[in-house]
Image (spheres, helix red, strand yellow):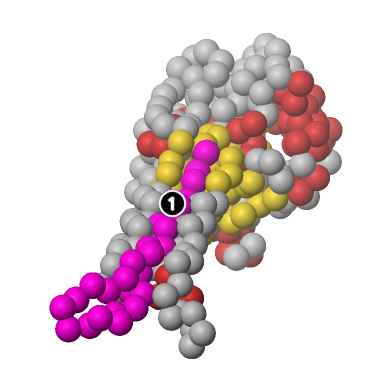
Amino acid sequence: MFLDYAIIHVKGGAGGDGCMSFRHEKYAPYGGPDGGDGGKGGDVIFEARLGKNTLRDISGSTHYAAEDGRNGMGSLCTGRSGWDIVIALPCGTVIRDKDKGVILRDLVNAGDRVVVAKGGMGGKGNKRFATATDRAPRQFTKGEPGEGRIVELELKLIADLGLIGLPNAGKSTLLSRLSNAHPKIAAYEFTTLEPQLGIMEAYEYKSIVLADIPGLIEGAHEGSGLGDEFLRHIERTRGLVHLVDVGTPEPKMKAIRAYEAIRGELAEYSSALIEKPELVVATKMDLTGAEERLAEFEKELGRPVIPISAITGKGLEQLRVEFTRMAEQQA
């Protein structure tokens, strides 16, 4: 199951207490203090790793705590530090402090890591407080508590181009023809219930990552259909590929109206999305009457679009060239 949002509580380990102790040895009548320091508490660390593509792995638990440091001991023995806890996250995860509303880190690349809850420092043993005038101090300090916070984790997939459009516009079919992805394809709306990634082999041994998000409908920003939360997964893309169905003989919405509805939803979600470079693609050109509806759509849109049929393969090679050009220009 794909999961792109989670809220968890993290807590660093508490530091161990310092020790109060005195040497008692046969040939050392004035042994003096020998209490060791407490160990540091473990940290809670988030790290981005390849092979992770969902937050499902960590959703099973809402609390993560690092190990406490051990208390100091006599003979100047320092307590062992607590073990850190390292939580693996997908690349593209945004970590936010829920209470403060600030972003702690955006883990974009594999290996990126951040300490989200520091462990407490260990307390000082009484040996630390020995002075020339106080040679037998009975003073020591407790370990500090570990840092705790509630964090929001939001996964934003990392892709070069994002496929957008109404449900059944042909996004999943196109993704399956151009990449190694195998999304669910059916003749009813909302067959895509979660984002899908596919890698398209481009020219000169280059590859382009495509992201197919669930179809939007008018009013998605108000919760209609599947809503617009999935749009977070195209925020990082270099450009958008807007698929418009011009082949269906009696669509629920005219092509130009469908195009404007999706653009409106993008604007409602983020001004940054509406400003991304956009490639408009007319789909299902294998159906009867598609050429006439394409001409009407281009006239109303005021610019040419790329006509394709993912079923017959018409226009796919041109689209592959345009995808490559678009990704390279925005690199």
Q: Between residue 18 and residue 155, name the one nearer to us.
A: 18
Q: Is residue 25 magenta?
A: yes
Q: Between residue 46 and residue 15, name the one nearer to us.
A: 15
Q: Between residue 187 and residue 308, name the one nearer to us.
A: 187
Q: Is residue 205 magenta?
A: no
Quadrant of res 293: top right
What residue would you read off at disc 1?
A: 13
Q: Quadrant location of the C terminus?
A: bottom right
- Name the amino acid, label 1: Gly
Which residue appears farthest toward the bottom when viewing the image?
Answer: 132
Label 1 element class:
loop
Residue in the image at 51% along x and 52% along y: 146
Does residue 120 appear in the picture of this structure?
no
Residue 168: image location, x then y, percent: 57, 22
Does residue 168 appear in the picture of this structure?
yes
Numbered circles on residues, count: 1
Residue in the image at 19% along x and 76% along y: 25
Q: Quadrant location of the N terminus?
A: top left
Q: Is residue 89 left or right of residue 282?
A: left
Residue in the image at 48% along x and 66% along y: 139
Q: Is residue 151 left or right of residue 90?
A: right
Residue 227: image location, x then y, percent: 66, 23
Quadrant of res 294: top right
The magenta-colored residue range is: 9-35
Residue in the image at 70% along x and 13% along y: 252
Q: Between residue 145 and residue 126, name the one nearer to us.
A: 126
Residue 273: image location, x then y, percent: 73, 45
Q: Is residue 274 above or below residue 217?
A: below
